[in-house]
Image (tube, rainbow, N blue to C red):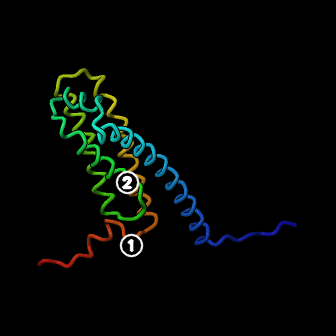
Amino acid sequence: MFQQITVNPACSRQALNVIKMKKTKILYWIFTSLFALLMLGSAIPDVFSAQIAVEGFAKIGLPAYLVPFVGIAKTLGVIAILVPGYPRLKEWAYAGLVFDLIGATYSIAASGQPAESWAFMVLPLALAFTSYYFYQRKLRLVGSKDSVANSVGSYPSLG
């Protein structure tokens, strides 16, 4: 009446890995898209030296000529984290975007502005770290040959 089904442990492990990978990729793209959208939204006024961006820089004591430079750097960072592949470039892009956020938070706080002016920065920083966490998790699950962790050992030794 009932037939006993035997399950190959390797197949069930593989099925679990596929599910884990799908979940990781979905979470990665959700957090990365939100982070990229937020960073691009803050970069566009900078690229065009919009009055609001110039005034924001002036409030924290930074010169207006930095505005388009920071905007272009943020835009390039967003492109780098969205384009598939190029793991080393992604690492640098994440670092640059996080440095931008930390520097902006510090500058706003150090310029004497109230906490509500810089407390919002927790959100983009949280998105950055969550996106990066799932990026690294995705690389580990794939076992990618082009991941940064795997490519470090590929350089010839100097000693």
Compared to residue 21, the image places residue 30 above or below, namely: above
- Is residue 30 shown left or right of residue 66? right
Badge 2 is on which residue?
Answer: 79
Considering the image in quadrants, where does the N terminus appear?
bottom right
Q: Secondary structure at mark 2?
A: helix
- Is residue 137 shown left or right of residue 152? right
**The furthest residue to the left:** 159
Compared to residue 65, the image places residue 18 above or below, namely: below
Indicate the position of residue 8 as horizontal and vertical percent values. Answer: 64, 72
Badge 1 is on which residue?
Answer: 145
Indicate the position of residue 110 as horizontal and vertical percent values. Answer: 16, 28
Q: Secondary structure at mark 1?
A: loop
Indicate the position of residue 65 as horizontal and vertical percent values. Answer: 18, 39
Indicate the position of residue 144 as horizontal and vertical percent values. Answer: 41, 69
When asked about the image quadrant of residue 17, the answer is bottom right
Q: Which mark is residue 29?
A: none
| Circle 2: residue type | Ile
